[in-house]
Each structure stands twice: as structure tokens, then as C-alpha cells.
């Protein structure tokens, strides 16, 4: 989420003419060497799981956990995030998908994820596998991802309070006051 917002803010507002050409930017900006790149990682269940978590965390805000692009963010963008399950994306080579994730798409909302301290090329290749898996994503997998996606601060706070209540049987407010008082007495 932090990554996404940074990419978003760093982008200069495109002019209207630039926006008109945005749809073509993906293909024209792609060096032909990118097309031939092969995914060096073998698909393994644990990699798949990591990629799912990564996608839920960094990509779902625009693309949706199922890749449909039907998100609050996505709807307000031009160009919109495409449905990643369809041939427009699935017909890209692994190398092309890798290139787009690493470098983003100029004049669009698609941020570049390469070069971030936490994102390595390996992570990007895992995402390439995950994008290949999207057309076969099961409802169970999607539900699992929904539980991983960043939550709104309210939802997060609510969950934390519930958890606290379940853990020690005290209401969150009581716990807070007790700690507070203790701090003053010492
Ligand atoms: C802030 C919104 C946003 C985030 C976050 C985002 N994307 Fe995108 N993505 C877009 C938009 C918008 C496009 C379409 C750009 C265009 O058509 O020019 C796009 C396009 C793509 C494409 C090209 C698909 C095609 O058919 O052209 C891929 C692949 C992709 N994104 C993968 C990812 C992955 C993987 C992540 C997470 C690491 C991610 N995106 C995060 C907005 C986003």
C-alpha cells in the first residue's frame, strides 16, 4: 500500500494528449529484450502463497484480489486496470509481464515496483506466476487473500479490539486505563 501510494504521488499529472496515448504506452515502451526473458523460478506451493500475499498487499487495491480490476481505485482511473485474467494480459510473455511490474506503465496509474528495497526481482517473478494462476483462482484462495489485503484503519482497529477482548477477557478501554494508571504510579 505504501509502495502504491508513493508511485501514485510521484507521477506528474499527464496532459490530455499524453493521456490519449496512454493505452499504447505499454507496448511501445517495452524493449524487445524484455519479451524474451524467462521466469527463472520454478512454481512451488510456498512461492505461490508468498505471491498471493504480495499481490493482496501491493496490487489488489487497484487490480482486486481476483485480478478483475473492479475496485474503488480502479474505477476512477484512466486507463483502468485491465482484467488480468483475460487474453490482453495472459497473451503477454512472462518477460513482458515482469517488465511491466518492474517498470510500471508510463502515463497510467500502474506504478513501477522494481528497485524498491523490499521488492526483489524474485518477488516480481513470483508475481508473474501468480498472474498466470489468476484465471484458475479458486473461491477459497480469493477468500484467503481477502483476509490478507490491507484493511481500512477502522476495520483494523475493530479487529484488534476484538482480538484483545478474546485474548484476556478485558475490554480494550479497561486495559488502556489500567496501563495508563500504572505508568503514572511508578
Ligand atoms: C495504483 C494502482 C495500481 C497498482 C497498485 C498496481 N497496478 Fe498494475 N496496473 C494499473 C493500471 C491502471 C494498469 C493499466 C495501465 C494501462 O493500460 O496503460 C495496470 C496494468 C498492469 C499490468 C499490464 C496488464 C495489461 O494487460 O496490460 C500488469 C501485468 C499489472 N498491472 C500488474 C500489477 C502487479 C503485479 C501489481 C502489484 C505488484 C500492480 N499491477 C499494482 C494500476 C495499478
Image: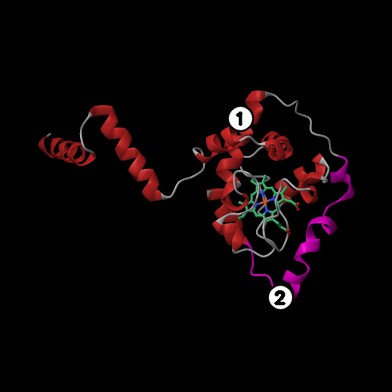
Q: Is residue 89 visible?
A: yes
Q: Is residue 118 visible?
A: no
Identify residue for label 2.
Answer: 16
Does residue 100 lie above or below 178 as drawn? below
Q: In the structure shown, which secondary structural element does the residue marked by tag 1 occupy?
A: helix
Q: How many numbered circles are shown?
A: 2
| Residue 183, disc | none
Q: Is residue 26 magenta?
A: yes
Q: Is residue 34 magenta?
A: yes
Q: Which residues are magenta?
A: 11-36
The reply to whether callout 2 and callout 1 are in contact (CB within 8 Å) is: no
Does residue 138 lie above or below 89 as drawn? above
Does residue 163 lie above or below 34 as drawn? above
Residue placed most toward the observer, 44 or 86: 86
Point out residue 93 in the picture as x, y percentages from the top left corner: 83, 42
Identify residue for label 1.
Answer: 49
Picture quadrant where residue 129 is located: top right
Residue placed most toward the observer, 35 or 11: 35
Which comes before the other along the chain, label 2 or label 1?
2
Main SS of the magenta part reads helix
Amino acid at each position: 500500500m505504501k509502495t502504491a501510494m508513493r508511485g501514485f504521488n510521484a507521477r506528474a499529472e499527464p496532459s490530455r494528449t499524453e493521456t490519449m496515448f496512454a493505452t499504447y504506452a505499454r507496448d511501445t515502451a517495452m524493449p524487445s529484450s524484455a519479451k524474451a526473458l524467462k521466469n527463472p523460478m520454478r512454481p512451488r506451493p510456498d512461492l505461490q502463497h508468498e505471491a498471493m500475499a504480495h499481490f493482496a498487499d501491493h496490487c489488489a487495491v487497484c487490480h482486486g484480489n481476483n485480478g478483475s480490476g473492479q475496485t474503488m481505485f480502479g474505477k476512477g482511473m484512466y486507463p483502468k486496470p485491465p482484467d488480468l485474467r483475460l487474453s490482453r494480459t495472459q497473451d503477454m510473455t512472462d518477460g513482458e509481464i515482469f517488465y511491466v511490474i518492474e517498470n510500471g506503465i508510463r502515463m497510467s496509474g500502474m506504478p513501477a515496483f522494481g528497485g524498491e528495497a523490499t521488492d526483489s526481482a524474485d518477488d516480481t517473478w513470483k508475481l508473474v506466476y501468480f498472474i498466470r494462476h489468476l484465471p484458475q483462482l479458486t473461491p477459497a484462495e480469493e477468500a484467503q487473500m481477502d483476509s490478507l489485503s490491507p484493511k481500512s484503519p477502522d476495520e483494523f482497529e475493530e479487529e484488534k479490539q476484538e482480538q484483545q477482548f478474546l485474548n484476556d477477557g478485558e475490554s480494550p478501554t479497561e486495559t488502556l486505563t489500567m496501563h495508563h494508571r500504572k505508568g503514572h504510579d511508578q
